[in-house]
Amino acid sequence: MSVINYAAKAINFKVVYYGPGVAGKTANLQYVHKSLPDANKGNMISLATGDDRTLFFDFLPVSAVTVRGFETKFQLYTVPGQVYYNMTRKLVLRGVDGVVFVADSQYDRLKENVESLRNLEENLKEYEYDIDKMPWVLQYNKRDLPNVAPRDYMEFLLNRRPRRVPSFEAVALEGKGVYETLNTVSRMILMSEFGVEQEVRT
Amino acid sequence: MSVHDVAIHEVDAAKIDALLTRFLDDSSATAALLIDRSGQPLTTVGPSRSLDTVSIAALAAGAFSSTGALARLLGETEFSVLFHQGAKENMHVSTVDEQAIMLVIFNDQTTVGMVRLFAKEASRAIGEILAEARKRPRKTGGLAAPISADELGPSFPNKRA
């Protein structure tokens, strides 16, 4: 949920990186944290288990472009991907403005992607958000691995809803596709909040 | 835009700051933060040293929401107060309304009882201001007219190569 603060001249948005376990959600945030200048980022917080799996969420606040004199700030969150952490995933989605769905491109992980996307849709509904009406993008991660499904097949599995969303191939660990994804979702959020109606739908 | 979206106009910010400042005077606490339940800091008053309020807000909202989930497992609607005791610094988090929580940092200059008493009073008054704020138009001044796609460049132009 966006917060416009006229006193501080800032607009805050919340972006959640969603997807199955070990798909690379945390890797996306780590790369953004590594590559942004200090002035544009805050501290990254990871609430992880001993073996580096996200337990509650990762959090990274970043500041982006100034729009009409207001600084735009995006708070990036990840959720735990493991199926049994659904309660905490739901909590992190509260007040979300946009979602990056990070899919694992490997053949043997395709089923988990589909289940996780369905889970996202269900959890959003609990907050009365409709996935087909909110800004979200798809990221097909781990494209450097040998056993990945073709992009078209990923599209067929994950991107054939009434409204197709932008999708990006990525190797998040190396930063490939990370900013294309983030720039697109943040622009979609800004347009959905401040744009004219026709542009929201395109 | 969702029904939960918030705008804090200058007039509301000034009123909330005045209330929180008075709360700090009354309770002898060190700092007070008003936080949206999604994790966004709304306003901060009185940190005597530089606090990472953005991280504090995200973590406190997370802790408060997971405590709320625990409460529901026990058949409660929520636990309306959360108290963390440290060796020197303590934290008191309490409900303002359905959208916001208030976090107070205090040390041995005061007691949890004092903080709780005055926080309850301040929360009620802040809740009323927030209810008024939600009735105002969200976009005024420079933000009133729609933004065209051409106006927006890349959101993060200055990342390192």
Image: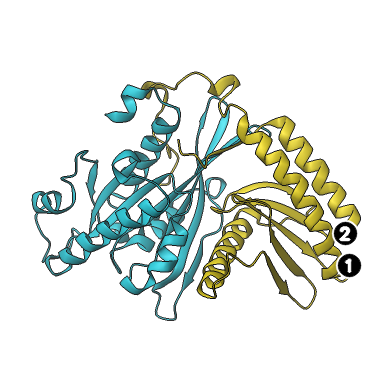
Residue A96: % across, % down: 44, 48
The C terminus of chain A lies in which quarter of the figure?
top left
Q: Mark 2 points at which residue?
A: B27
Residues at marks 1 and 2 touching, judged by CB atoms closer than 8 Å: yes
Count of numbered circles on the image:
2
Q: Which of A94 and A77 is in front in this view?
A: A94
Q: Which residue is drawn at 38% across and 74% down?
A: A53
Element at label 2: helix
Residue A45: % across, % down: 52, 64
Q: In this view, does A159 lie to the left or right of B86?
A: left
Disc 2 crowd, CA 10 A, few/some/many (<14, 14-19, 20+): many
Disc 1 crowd, CA 10 A, few/some/many (<14, 14-19, 20+): few
Residue B114 visible in this rendered orientation of the protein: yes
Q: Residue at x 70, y 73 (%)?
A: B84
Chain A painted colour = cyan
The disc, 1 or 2, on the residue closer to the chain's N-terminal end is 2
Q: In this view, does A170 lie to the left or right of A66?
A: left
Q: Identify residue type, mark 1.
A: Thr
Q: Which of B51 and B159 is in front in this view?
A: B51
- Letter of the chain shown yellow in the rendering: B
Q: Identify residue type, mark 2.
A: Ser
Element at label 1: loop
Q: Residue at x 30, y 69 (%)?
A: A21
Q: In this view, does A17 lie to the left or right of A11?
A: left
Q: Is residue B62 left or right of residue A18?
A: right
Q: Mark 1 points at which residue?
A: B110
Residue B90: % across, % down: 76, 70
User: Alpha carbon of mark 1 to alpha carbon of mark 2: how far?
Assistant: 7 Å
